[in-house]
Amino acid sequence: MGDLQIYNQNPENDEEDLLTHGYRSDLKWALKDYRPPRYRYLRYRAPMQIKEEVLQSNRVCRVISMLCKETGKSTDQLNCEAMAILEEMGHEFSEGVLRCIGGLMRKVFKQILTRVVIDKEQMASLSRLSKQSPLLIMPNHRSYLDFMLVTWVLYSYDIKTPVIAAGQDFMFMKGVGEVLRRCGAYFIRRSFGKDKLYWALFTEYTQTHVINGDAPVEFFIEGTRSRTGKSLQPKFGMLTIALEPYFDARVSDVTICPVSLSYERTVEETLHVRELMGIPKPKESTRGLIKAHTILNNNYGTIYVKVGCCLSVHKMAQERKVDRKVRALFPRAVIPSVQPHERSFVNELAYRVLTEQQKGAVTFTCSVLASVLLSYLQRGVWSIAVEQIRTEVEWAGGFLSSLGAPTMQSETTWLDHSIAMLAPVVSRVGEDIVVDKSPTGCEHLTRSFKLCYSFISLARRRNELMHSVINLTMIAILLQHPKVPTCLRGQFLKLRQVLSAEFIFMPGQEESDVDHSLATLSPYLITSCGTFKFPPGPERALLCSLIRPFLQTYLTSWQFVLSYLPRTEGHGQGVGEFCRRVQTYLSVLQSATEGVNLSVIENSLIGLSRMGLLYISKDKTNMYCLDPAGISDLIGEVALILNPLPAKL
Amino acid sequence: MPADEEKAFPMKRQEGLKWNGWGYRDSKFIHAPDTDTCTFSGNRYPMCGISMPHLMKWFREHLGANTNEKSPAKPLDLSKIPQPIRCPEFVAEARQWCKSISEDAEDRLMHGHGHLCEEIYVLRNNEYFDRIPDMVVFPSCHKDVEELVKLATKYNVVIIPMGGGTSVSGALLCPTEERRTIVSMDMTEMNRIHWIDPENLMAHIEAGIIGQDLEKQLEREGYTTGHQPDSLEFSSLGGWVATRASGMKKNIYGNIEDMVVRVKMVTAKGTIEKSCQVPRISCGPDVHQMILGSEGTLGVITEVTLKIKPLPECTEYGSLIFPEFDKGINFLHEVSRKKIYPASIRLMDNEQLQFGLALKGEKSIFEKMTDYVKQVYITRLRGFKQEKISLCTVVFEGAKDRVQWEQKQIYDIAAGFGGIPAGEENGKQGYLLTFSIAYLRDLGMDYHFVAESFETSVPWDRVSDLIKNVKQRIVDSCLEQGVCHTPYSAARVTQCYDTGACCYFYFGFSSVGLADPMAVYSNLEQAAREEVLANGGSVSHHHGIGKVRAQFLEGTISSVGKQALMAVKQGLDPQNIFGNGNLIGVVGPTGAIKSKL
């Protein structure tokens, strides 16, 4: 489906470490020759000129004349307002600043990272593509570093650095906002609801970059950083805006480059764990950033930057029979609204991008280690012998990669290294590996919350490998039932619906996913007369241990829904408030689990609402049961899947 | 007023014209490998005798052609031509009305195709077509045609009318599933001008007359139709009407539909015509509009009354250079807003301009142009870039003072868009080249090079985007399909209207290493046409639908629109006598027994 095959068949040969690549001196590196190839129809424009052209565009002019009539403000006044917005929004790209920051980043990276691994061949292809059509660079979003990392890598390979759609939170960081602006970031308000002028300006500003190809446009399909280690559900707005020039035949094609950034450890690890537990996130500030200088003393391991299969929007649109003629009946002066068939195309594309990102993601050994440790923690064991762990992780790593999770081959020192990557939660004490029950940084928490901290911290790392095995774990947990499930497919689909907010499932691929999963697991399955059996053993245990915590939390949360949520509209509850109640309940009741993870609790509710059992208002302030009997049935079904004997809570 | 002079080509057209390429047998590009120069043979064109030292070099460097590796055309092999399906009864009776009937294989082959790239490729490679006409008839007057069509309905044979045979839509190809006898009706013997009316400025002409013959004869009387399509030398009046042709100077003289005052068409049910020849009429939907563009699906056009004009007092050429193509487009748009239309105004993009330069000879005027260009941007320091400039050529025609006024207006408007006058010679050269350029494809095909052109019309606000996107689509589609060198992809704006423009595209690619160059070509054309439509362009401005664009007809005129066309077809031709299958595909019986597969 619309793939531009830019993958080299055996990527290992083309990988190189950007930290040791090229110039030794960071200064020389910053002053290196940088003449990126240009998009073939580029018309050079200075940042100010871009803003002026946006102001004069059809779209903006129309909105302004409309607002003139609506609000009675003069055109001049509205033009001033528009320019002020553009000044607030627009980038001020400057190659000089880019070079300085680039050099500085390299210095810092050398200090805190082991390696930054890039595929040369992918970069060369990207460079070729950047001449042919406008690019949308779409990385996954795990860290603040993402903003600059792609820019930095592209600069290193003489590819035009992107303009980056960034949330406004950054802008308020004194100095940092301005620096980012000069490296190509432009800032979007988090919410601008019905502000038509803002909407027009932001749309036009993004699109003019796509049409003229001033620079690749970078944005995050997940909308925000994922705190959980898993991909977030895709957001469609920005992608729709960026593709409208194609629907409108302003450009003949747009190339989407999904980029996978895999961090062995992110710098904001602690922050994210705290956020998942509901401890508020500090506002982004420069002071905060400076305070974070302790980061410099840590090692964050390796970063892999992989460019996935670049997608030609035109090819995909052709396959999906997207009819662009519909728009051609509108004169350029009139802007047609997004057509339904375009919307569904964008949705599909967004999922496609996410899957491509996931395909490119690298699973680090520490994620396997975290998974193994969690399975011990689930049994209440907090301290395990080193050798036992070593054997188990090596086995699990081999097993998972045989299932298709691309785990990295590790050196002999992998264990110590992985422990370091999980620090401070995990440490080595003598001949034992110990998970800290009260790690630094959460001294003020209650005891049970402290325990949860380690759980969630490890769960985050485990989540990083979930995307490659999620379908397999679902099959495994369904097959652990002693009675062979009569309708495996049906149950699989049900489970998928339940978990639809938790993981990324490509819509429309349910059937092929079942087939593919069964084929992958076939060496471990006993097949007879079209039914399958997964005999007990370490394989089944491992796979089940990966998915069980999610379902356990879901069950509790649903029980809570049944007991405490009203059945009518009037007395609905806010989602946030409700999740916190579930969390408190869980932390008290079950002493220590990863269930206190607010994100999992919320996803359990979204899953219910997608199944039509629960109503959640758009702004998430109101929520009530639609079908208590349905929820009750669902609880029964899932409980049966989890425990072959019906469980009672 | 019988045609006593020499015709553009004889009745046995292969004696004057190439059987597997464009134009006259004596005219072609010849490459001398030892000196690496090209010359144009014969003495028919201004280009003849000039040696072109840069052409092959440009071919190699810009188009990736390998001029050492030839792909010469194969000689005619008549044994490969399909056997005719005869209808002796028809022939016997037809001889009463038509002295000239041919069942000669060469004649049949010559009447079974137009000049689409695929058609020429087939001829050059000795593959030929699965189905060609089984015989050719040459009627000499309207009555002949009427009787022949009657016979055709009597014996259930198919008639495919043919004029000059310059179609680029596959319109002359025979439907392969047709099992009845196919008669090609060659109209070129019907080439008389019946009368000229100096009072009302009209002329009544037989439809088989070839453009250049018509113009020569009218010129002697001091008139012109002013209709000047690029195919003028070989295309016929009836063909123009049947395809809705457009001429270079339509700004003054109009397109064919503006010139036609009256037209006669013989259908299977008899002759359709109006009983008056008036400047305008309100009498229900205009039956002329049904005939214009009917592409031989409803009947044979036999006679046409056309508007004529006295020869213009003066004709002046001019040219303008713009710093970039888009500026030129904006200029054209402004010209049409102000409605100061010179006879012709065209804008070529940089790729075309560069190509034009490659064609320059040692003594050529093009050399002077480059000199002039250099001079322009050195002296004026306008920052014009050689790889961005675009050239606009203009023809002014009419009364002297009117022409002068137009010239001033045009140059004033151009100045506002950064345009600089670039001399009369460049303009003139641009137009004179038009006719010889068509021969280039044959030269390319000698070196594994496949080339074609197509056109569209589009509203002004989409002209620029459409050209950019379609050119890019051509390149992308070629590279995707494994064409090893970036293809040639160029465009020009050839006509201006109040609400839009006509854009013409040229493309070509090296077929070296391709398993099936024609499959690549046809995918490419499909992709390009889809891009055109997505950009708000039309399926065709003047080439017509024929068979190659038939798939886009319904999308263009809606399914109800297509049903309406089919209803007309069913009503006028239930037997499907005019069964060339153009426009709406094969409608009605074909004589084929449906195979039970």
Image: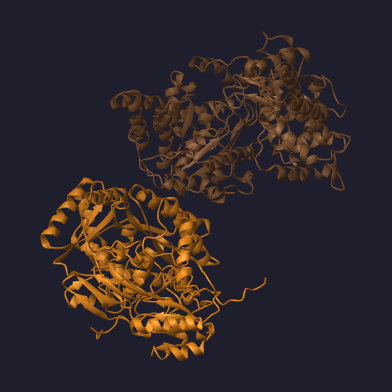
**How many numbered markers are drawn?**
0
Which chain is displayed in brown in the rendered image? A
For the point 49% across and 79% down, the residue is B132
Q: Specify whether residue B34 is in view.
A: no
Report the quarter where the N terminus of chain B lies: bottom left
Residue situated in front as seen by the camera: A263 or B19: B19
Instruction: Answer left or right for B22 relative to B409.
Output: right
Residue at the left extreme? B401
Of the chain colours in the picture, the one used for chain B is orange
Task: Choose between B224 and A301: the one closer to the eye.
Answer: B224
Quadrant in the rendering for residue A185: top left
Colour scheme used in the picture?
by chain
Residue A524 in picture, x, y percent from top left: 83, 42
Q: Position of residue B147 (x, y in %)?
A: 40, 84
Residue B396 lies, with reference to residue A302, above or below; the image says below
Q: Judge from the rendering whether residue B89 lies leftward or rightward of residue B31; answer left or right.
A: right
Residue A264 appears in the figure: yes
As drawn, A104 above or below B14? above
Compare residues A401 and B237 and report the one nearer the observer: B237
Q: Quadrant of residue A648?
A: top right
Q: Is residue B407 left or right of residue B3?
A: left
Residue A476 pos. (x, y %): 80, 36
| Picture quarter with the C terminus of chain B | bottom right
Question: What's the residue at 32%, 54% (across, down)?
Answer: B501
Residue A437 in the image: above or below residue A181: above
Could you say where residue A400 lies in the image, as x and y percent from the top left? 75, 37
